[in-house]
Image (cartoon, helix red, strand yellow):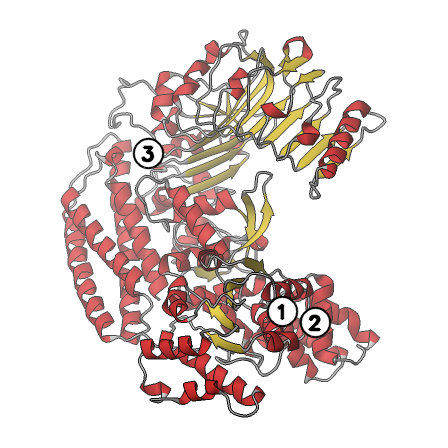
């Protein structure tokens, strides 16, 4: 319930901050009251960040009350704001609302009371200490499981253990819960050569709520146990172990000092299993001496950031098993050395695939099948009920082990992770989409000097480094593009969503937004592709927008217009079919943050000038749309507030014949991405006609795509020096100083562009930071350059060009990793092959050359 309370407070805080935005100055609200309420909400939210780990029944009850109050307040504020918007739309002045003011005052007092009560309750509660995660033994394992898919890692770890490094070195093993970190460490620890090589070996498992004294005590106990098993006769080590007091009577320092003395001057191997935080390591590292004799420490962790801070000699990242490895592990677990019956093999492979490569799940289901009848009926039933069997299995309770990663999250990441798990279509999501949705939902806490999207990306990166989100696709310059969540973690999240009452889930097929509202589903909704549609707390993606088509703002009452105000993300396909109703409704989208408009072929849509008056607009995407200019400052519309700067607008994509006048670039000074298209409708095709010289004033612009359907010359044009990615399509390029003068440029795309004399000659120009270069189509024949012009180039792609002259020394370019040639001349193909041969001769074994030859009819 704490997560739902936290998310509800974040949502309310988001709403209050929007109400206090300068653009809303004509809304009639008591600013002092709203600021006071915002302060109370912030205090509660910050308190939950610090104390949400306290598991207490009364705390849960108070969390439920906080969530209810915050959610109700959100709705009341919506109605109040819409009453005023409707009044203004009819030319009336907004009236004071005594009832609203009294409600806010009462809410302030109630929030204050809840804050005092939850502080008092948190002081009484004590966090429950659990020394071992589910299914883990704190001491060294008595056996070791079959190792599948990690044989190479085992060999490399063994080599590192016995290598020439005399210093005490750390070896880290990183991966999500259940992926086989502990199994790999067990196989290393129990290896006969390891036992022979190290005089002392010890194993300790760390819990989330760790105790340094318990960890050290476990190490001492394991040393005692192992030495009693392996040492014959008297050993001074035994005397040191048992001298003085009992271990239970010793302080943390005394225990650590005893461990230090035992390990001193001996070659040892310590395994620290399931380390959750660097703080736990810092508590014990001083008691592990560096004897200069090749001692080693193996640490397993779920968190990449922890492994990074360990300064490991080498770090091994575990991967999910592939198809064959999964089946081999399942077959070995079920049948051992026996043969799988032919009638069960295909079904068994399907079961293995459904485990999605997670060794812990495969072992759990294998343990169940090993004890069951070997019949098709039993195995088919297992296939149908896989998740429930894994959840209730006796192989360490797989789901509980995975759930530990969720429990260890700070509360702000818990709400984000649950939300990402629910919205991830087929468990795959594009990084920008996730970030925008988290911002739109109000889950992202502002940080000074950072955009909300930057903070959201930090949240996502944190979840990736905790191995809760999987990286499914990497971009050409190393950035994460597509992520996903393992199916079992996704199932855990859906159960947690239900327990936390974080989202409402109902069958919503054929339901309009108005109907959903009547059923007490929150008015901002996101449909998930699953057997049940799940609706979230703040978000609406209306692909049909039936409500907009059915309702007229001038005629309908406040309750039916709430969805408009609450809209934070709007995706509308084929908008042209709606006529003027959508455009007349634009002023109602008061909190709109993201607008995606896809026009059908041959139907160009013009968005109204009121778009420029949406104060919270962050992203505007379209395939092709005409964007009306902002209305002049002296536009005499009654009830209209003064034009304001759209300080949050970051992405503007698909604008046709974009005019970059002063009113535009001053309205959107923080644009980061701009993609514009120029149609062949105008007689003048120079940049001055569209005031493109003003692009240089967009000093935060990082991505620019400029497409000309005619032949626009970019002569005497300058771009902002902040650009990192530049794409030019159908442009005439008198020279390339327009791009080489950009000090931060990392990606450059030139498509269907023309050059003077069909030549691109580089003399003094240098692309110092350029990592990716794409040249497609066009009439380029002569490319005169050398490796010094592209000192950082990693990827080069050439499409549909018939080059006659090429850079000759790209084979010596040390940074180059990939060259792709698609439908080019034979001479261009041969040049790419020569580059590949030269790269390989210089030892670049990972170099890739991809050649797609011309088809005969091209």
**First in residue order: circle 1 vs circle 3:** 1
- Label 3 Cα neighbours within 10 Å, binned few <14 / some 14-19 / many ≥20: many
Q: Which residue is mark 1?
A: 359
Q: Nearer the viewer, mark 1 or mark 3?
A: 1
> How far apart are the two marked residues, 1 and 3, measured between alpha carbons?
50 Å
Foreground residue, 566 or 854? 854
Q: Which residue is mark 2?
A: 329
Residue lying furthest top in this view? 683
Percent position (x, y) of residue 166?
53, 63
- Residue 142 shown left or right of residue 414 in the figure: right
- Residue 450 shown left or right of residue 163 in the figure: left
Foreground residue, 381 or 511? 381
Identify the residue at horizontal 26%, vertical 51% (top origin): 76
**Residue 615: numbered disc:** 3
Q: Nearer the viewer, mark 3 or mark 2?
A: 2
Of the 4 image quadrants, the one containing the N terminus is bottom left
């Amino acid at each position: 319930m704490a997560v739902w309370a936290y998310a509800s407070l974040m949502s309310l805080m988001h709403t209050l901050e929007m109400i206090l935005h300068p653009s809303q100055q004509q809304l009639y609200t008591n600013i002092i009251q709203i600021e006071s309420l915002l302060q109370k909400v912030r205090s509660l939210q910050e308190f939950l960040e610090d104390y949400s780990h306290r598991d207490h029944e009364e705390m849960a009850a108070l969390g439920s009350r906080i969530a209810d109050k915050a959610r109700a307040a959100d709705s009341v504020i919506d109605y109040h704001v819409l009453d005023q918007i409707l009044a203004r739309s009819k030319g009336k002045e907004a009236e004071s609302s005594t009832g609203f003011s009294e409600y806010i005052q009462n809410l302030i007092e109630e929030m204050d009371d809840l804050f005092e009560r939850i502080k008092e309750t948190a002081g009484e509660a004590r966090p429950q200490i659990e020394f071992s995660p589910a299914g883990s033994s704190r001491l060294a394992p008595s056996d070791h499981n079959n190792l599948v898919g990690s044989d190479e890692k085992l060999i490399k770890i063994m080599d590192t253990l016995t290598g020439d490094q005399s210093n005490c070195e750390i070896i880290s093993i990183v991966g999500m819960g259940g992926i086989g970190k502990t199994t790999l460490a067990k196989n290393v620890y129990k290896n006969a050569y390891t036992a022979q090589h190290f005089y002392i070996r010890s194993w300790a498992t760390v819990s989330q709520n760790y105790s340094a004294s318990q960890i050290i005590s476990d190490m001492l106990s394991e040393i005692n146990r192992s030495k009693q098993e392996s040492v014959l006769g008297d050993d001074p080590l035994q005397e040191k172990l048992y001298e003085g007091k009992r271990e239970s009577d010793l302080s943390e320092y005394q225990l650590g000092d005893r461990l230090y003395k035992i390990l001193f001057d001996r070659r040892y191997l310590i395994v620290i299993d399931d380390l959750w935080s660097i703080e736990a390591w810092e508590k014990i590292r001083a008691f592990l001496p560096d004897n200069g004799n090749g001692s080693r420490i193996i640490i397993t962790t779920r968190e990449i950031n922890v492994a990074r801070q360990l300064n490991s000699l080498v770090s091994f990242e575990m991967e999910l098993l592939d198809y064959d490895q999964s089946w081999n592990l399942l077959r070995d677990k079920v049948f051992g050395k026996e043969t799988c019956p032919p009638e069960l093999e295909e079904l068994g492979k399907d079961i293995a695939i459904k485990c999605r490569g997670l060794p812990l799940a495969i072992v759990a289901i294998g343990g169940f099948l090993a004890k069951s009848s070997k019949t098709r009926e039993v195995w088919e039933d297992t296939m149908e009920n896989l998740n429930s069997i894994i959840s209730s299995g006796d192989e360490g309770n797989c789901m509980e082990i995975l759930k530990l990663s969720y429990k260890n999250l700070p509360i702000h990441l818990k709400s984000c992770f649950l939300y990402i798990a629910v919205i991830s279509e087929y468990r795959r999501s594009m990084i920008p989409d996730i970030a925008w949705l988290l911002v739109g939902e109000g889950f992202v806490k502002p940080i000074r000097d950072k955009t909300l999207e930057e903070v959201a990306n930090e949240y996502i990166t944190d979840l990736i480094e905790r191995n809760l989100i999987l990286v499914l696709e990497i971009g050409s310059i190393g950035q994460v593009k597509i992520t996903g969540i393992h199916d079992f973690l996704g199932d855990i999240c859906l159960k947690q969503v239900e327990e936390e009452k974080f989202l409402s889930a109902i069958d919503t097929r054929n339901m309009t937004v108005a109907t959903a509202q009547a059923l007490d589903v929150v008015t901002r909704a996101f449909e998930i592709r699953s057997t049940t549609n799940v609706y979230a707390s703040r978000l609406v993606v209306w692909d049909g927008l039936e409500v907009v088509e059915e309702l007229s703002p001038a005629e309908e009452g406040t309750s039916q217009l709430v969805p408009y105000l609450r809209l934070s993300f709007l995706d509308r396909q084929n908008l042209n079919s709606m006529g003027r109703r959508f455009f007349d409704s634009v002023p109602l989208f008061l909190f709109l943050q993201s607008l995606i408009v896809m026009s059908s072929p041959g139907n160009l849509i013009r968005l109204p000038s009121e778009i420029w008056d949406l104060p919270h607009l962050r992203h505007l995407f379209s395939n092709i749309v005409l964007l009306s200019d902002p209305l002049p400052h002296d536009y005499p519309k009654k009830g209209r507030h003064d034009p304001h700067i759209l300080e949050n607008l970051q992405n503007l994509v698909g604008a046709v014949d974009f005019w970059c006048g002063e009113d535009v670039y001053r309205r959107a000074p923080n644009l980061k991405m701009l993609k514009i298209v120029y149609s062949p409708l105008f007689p003048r095709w120079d940049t001055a006609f569209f005031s493109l010289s003003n692009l240089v004033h967009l000093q935060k612009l990082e991505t620019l795509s400029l497409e000309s359907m005619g032949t626009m010359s970019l002569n005497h044009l300058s771009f902002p020096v902040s650009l990192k990615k530049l794409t030019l399509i159908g442009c005439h390029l008198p020279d390339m100083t327009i791009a080489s003068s950009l000090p931060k440029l990392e990606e450059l795309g030139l498509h269907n562009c023309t050059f003077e004399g069909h030549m691109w000659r580089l003399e003094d120009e240098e692309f110092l930071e350029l990592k990716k270069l794409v040249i497609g189509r066009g009439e380029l024949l002569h490319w005169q350059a050398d490796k010094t012009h592209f000192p950082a180039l990693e990827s080069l792609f050439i499409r549909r060009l018939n080059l006659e002259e090429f850079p000759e020394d790209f084979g010596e370019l040390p940074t180059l990793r990939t060259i792709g040639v698609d439908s080019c001349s034979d001479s261009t193909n041969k040049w790419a092959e020569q580059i590949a041969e030269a790269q390989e001769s210089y030892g670049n074994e990972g170099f890739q050359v991809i050649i797609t030859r011309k088809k005969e009819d091209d």
